[in-house]
Amino acid sequence: MLESVFTFLFKYRPAIYQHGQLGFDAPWPVAATLIAGALLLGAALLAYGGARPHLGQRDFVVLTVLRTAIVGLLVFALLRPVLVVSTVVPQENVLAIVLDDSRSMQLADRDGETRGAFVTETFAASDSPVLQELGERFKLRFFRFGTSVARHDPGLPLTFGQSRTDLKEALHFVRRELAGVPLAGVVLVTDGADNATNDLTDPLLQFKADQVPIYTVGVGRDALTRDIEVSRVEAPERVLLGSSVMVDVMLVQSGFRGDRVTLNVEDNGRIVTSQDIRLAGDREATMVRVQLLATEPGPRLFRFHVPQASGELVAENNVREVMVTVDDRREKILYFEGEPRFEVKFIRRAIADDNNLRVVTLQRTAENKFLRLGVEDADELAGGFPRTREELFTYRGIMLGSVEASFFAHDQLKMIEEFVGQRGGGLLVLGGRLAFAEGGYHGTQLANVLPVIMEPSADPEFFRTVEVQPTPTGRGHPVTRIGNADSGSTLSWAGLPALSILNPLARTKPGASTLLTGRADDGGDVYTVLAFQRYGKGTSIAFPVQDSWLWQMHADVPLEDLTHETFWRQMLRWLVSNVPDQIHVSTPAEDVEPGETISMTAEVRDSSYLGINGAEVEATVTDPLGNETTHALEWTVEEDGVYRAELATSLAGRYDVRVTARHGDRELGSALRQVRVEQHPTEYFGAHMRAPFLKNIAAETGGRFYREASIEGLTEDVRYTESGATRHESHDLWDMPIVFLVLLGSIAAEWGLRRFRGLA
């Protein structure tokens, strides 16, 4: 509508003004025209000056402005202004027509017709008026794209069956194929659903540098009228057997505001839980937190599904699947306590029956004397706290109790920092009279790792009793979820006894998350009770209370209640979650389509977790039929200890990839990774037409964006380009309707004011 109004008033489409330059083509001298205009304006002003006694100051100014506008418009018309633009020379330039051939083109969101029908009728049919007009001016070259890109014969039908949309590769392919020919522009016909996760900066800069505009044609609706989408599912990659798994699910809908739907969760085809959910407003996210229990070892495929609603346009985006690997192994944690206290006994008792956790305790009983509990042999921790990376890095988590910073050598504190940042381990620091600032940790390497801010000066006399409560973030965290009858925990946070703190920590670092806080029993200050942050590859946790054992032994806690046990099991499982092994294997995506390659990256570390170059790294791939193939991974050179390989797939199903590494005669270890290969409905997620994205592509390259309703303007606009073989055309501007409308309006306003003042 706005473009139509602009064209009516200014005679030409906006694209012409975008590419044109203003000039003048008067058949008489320009200077003479300007002088005549100045004389005419001067005479008018003299006439107004004679009538000045009958005019007020405001009327005089208004009449002067109106007469100046009238004279100015006349002079502008007499100068014969023109718009000079570059236009293509007919049949001497190439125009690329690039058509989206992906599955999202099958969506019928055009009054019951598919997007593909519009693409076929407008850009792939021999009797298309648009193609006929374009073909009169250009040599047309057709391309189709989706997961792959190829030349397209306009006589053959498009399939609209490709499983992904890769705009970056499409633009690169077109530029390579048409290098060296006079390319006037690119017409990109798509819904903009680029789901290949590629950055378009490079190809857009290349087209801009070549002065080749991209004209984008958006197909489909900006929003699907009635649709529910399971937009995102976030779950941990690996968990220990028996762990509580917290999964965040995001639903987005259009047309079902406030409706109630059911979210079903399946584990390998078996429904394990269902939740009734009320949907938020249109295009607003509805966040759902689902708690699952990892009861069986191995890779578990969880399926999150909302049944299709009545009138819903797309059913394929109602489902998301995520694979979680459940490890049945025993994780080793080093707990170093600087003095005898009850926390040691009750923490060890809390996890005593957990077959997947082993806490090795080193407790200082006197100067240079230690009690070792849970060690595997007589040599473990025989020399006290580890003094080498190799010894310390055999653990996956470290707990530090009430032990002063001066106990550690500088290298040991640095090792603890590297344990978290480089090795990727978990660090948990408990409160106590020799912990945090009271233990002299301010300004040490450990202060960098921790999520809390320690004050420079310690307060050895500080003591507060606090009522512990979860924060909004903590209410949904797997560590702080208690009160579950299935786990034997019946008390809620409000029912737990107060704890005492000796470390006044109230501030956390930017990027840290606080899960529990404690308000002093006098109703005063609020202190941090549980906070964490990511540090390098690992996680650091601060739990500055000294007597969590009261949640087990306080008189108000029933003897059979297991809240204390549940809390510490969840805490320590979280501490060692996702801690990498010496051999760590990753893939950019755990789901690929049949025929695509699996990009495999392996990080190979020695016992001190430094990268090893020159190792022999192999991947043994077991396909869905049980056939095994072996592939060598090559060192990337750019980064120590990082090896990569591309693994081809052909069959649908699960591929098990076991990566083993050797260095000389030494076996370094192995790691297992599962990858699912199957057809995925990627194209149906975020399937609305992305107008802002397509507008940006056009704007970055000097092109324009069109909707289906405005496609007629494309055939006119592509004529005006700086690329290819061009010639200059002049378009008159003196007879624009806006000139005559403003001129008539000014004359009428001036005459009306003079008549009102009795001067006419």
Image (cartoon, rainbow, N blue to C red):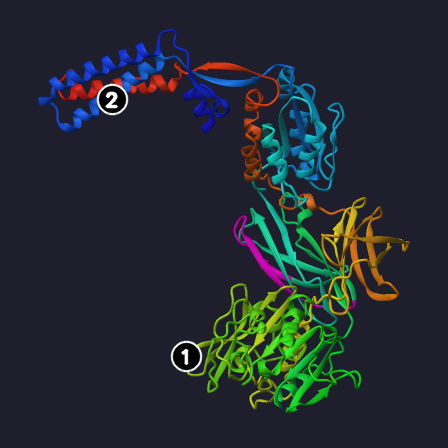
Does the magenta segment cover residue 281?
Answer: yes
Disc on the earlier residue, 1 or 2: 2
Secondary structure beneath dot 1 equals loop
Residue 632 to residue 718: above or below: below
Please give the residue where the numbered disc 1 appears in the rendered image: 524
Q: In percent of the image, x 58 and y 87: which residue is there? A: 550
Tell me if mark 2 has few (under 14), some (14-19) or many (20+) residues whose alpha carbon lies within 10 angstroms of its own.
some
Q: Quadrant of residue 473?
A: bottom right
- CA gap, disc 1 and disc 2: 72 Å
Amino acid type at mark 2: Leu
Image position, residue 376 (x, y; %): 79, 82
Q: Quadrant of residue 656?
A: bottom right
For the C terminus, give its image quadrant: top left
* Relative to 473, 272 lies left or right: right
Residue 307 to residue 169: above or below: below
Please give the residue where the numbered disc 2 appears in the rendered image: 66
**The residue stretch that appears in magenta:** 275-297
Q: Is residue 361 visible?
A: yes
Query: In the orientation shown, which residue stands out farthest toward the right?
Result: 627
